[in-house]
Image (cartoon, grey):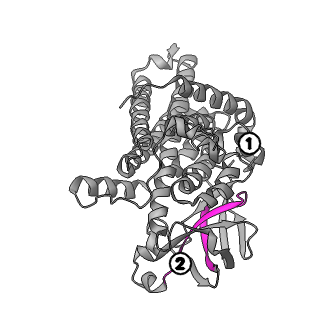
Amino acid sequence: MDLGLTEEHQMVRKMVREFAEKEIAPKIKELDRKHEYDRAILSKLGQQGILGICIPVRYGGAGMDYISLAIACEELERIDTSARVAMSVHVGLNSLSLLQWATEEQRLKYLVPQASGQKIATYGLTEPNAGSDVAGIQTTARKEGDHWILNGEKMWISLADVADNFLLIAWSDMEKKRKRDHSGMSAFIVERGFSGITTGSIHGKLGVRAGNTGSITLTECIVPEANLLGQEGEGFKIAMSALDGGRYTVAAGAVGLIQASLDASVRYANDRQSFGVAIGKHQLVQQMIAKMVARLDAGRLLVYQAGWLKNEGRRNTRETGLAKWVNCDAAFESANDAVEIHGAYGYSDEYDVERYLRNSRGAVIYEGSREIHQLMQASYALGYRQDKPLRCELPKYDPVEWQKES
């Protein structure tokens, strides 16, 4: 395993960093204060090729590898979490799932416009009464002729009011639903224009205030049979493999938030004076900064390990879950230390660290809570959990094949 970044990786970092500093940084404080989502940012992410960064060229993407995706997420969240969240749902949860599970016809119809940003996509698994307990979802799908009819509600869905395409999980076998048998779930590609789908926004969030979060209501929503993703009964497998993509982007973004917290703390510690010296001279401040450095390097290595496995086309559920859990906790701790270093100023939104702390808290919960990931890691170590091969694995990265036009 070679963890050295290539020239292409360095180019991605430079490009995404310049984009984030130019297009997001100048307006993010005001957007956060007003709880406003800027749709133009998402459009520009598409125009820059960032929304299709790890999608093969023949499907409208840039044909880069999964490490490039991680670098892009890191650089976006270094400026603000809301931009990385868009990458997580659009690319990590939806587009990578289409790349893995969709038919060629589905890829051409949905993945191509998503990779270029012409269409925006999201993912719906969580419901008002079902989060970590996936078998607790209540959304149903019944077959009628050449259509499926979906009924239910999804909650805490990023880009709910913005997305054109939705990847939704529902029970398609009611007998298996009663038995809580995961093999009774199926996955569906739903377009906003389909009859029976409505969305709404959630307000009053603690963090990610510049991001759109909402609900999806399905009332006799008519979905063509051709929009079944994978085979009937594979919904749970698809949902879990999608989380491997989403958690990977969250883990990578958390590295960016640690970096942002460290950078802000170093600047402030060198400028702020107390007891006649810069506060960076005080050992307890140095201790907090040193911990950020350790979290940053360890977290980045965890992400690159998961990314390398993805590039190899190998199952990475354990490694990605570990990176998500460890890095999100580390980002929260680093943002909290950054506020501490800034003292009273850290409690004001005049300084970015206040926003970092609020934004970091959500990632400890979503994409699998801290507690769920701890149980997962223990189950692997104890031998209670072993990953079974999926029918469709994430495609191995092939630089030659992924750069082909067709």
Indicate the position of residue 84 as horizontal and vertical percent values. Answer: 60, 43
Residue at the image point whose x is 53% and y is 51% from the top: 362
Indicate the position of residue 406 as horizontal and vertical percent values. Answer: 63, 44
Quarter where residue 4 is shown: top left
Relative vertical location of residue 279 with respect to residue 397 in this rendering, above or below: above
Disc 2: which residue: 138
Quarter that holds the N terminus:
top left
The first of marks 2 and 1 along the sequence is 1
Indicate the position of residue 225 as horizontal and vertical percent values. Answer: 62, 75
Magenta stretch encompasses residue 155: yes
- Which stretch did the figure color magenta? 148-173
Disc 1: which residue: 41
Query: Residue farthest to the top?
Result: 276
259 or 395, which is in the foreground?
Answer: 395
* Tag 2: amino acid: Gln
Disc 2 secondary structure class: loop
Residue at the image point whose x is 49% and y is 68% from the top: 235
* Tag 1: amino acid: Ile
Cα distance, mark 2 to mark 1?
34 Å
Disc 1 secondary structure class: helix
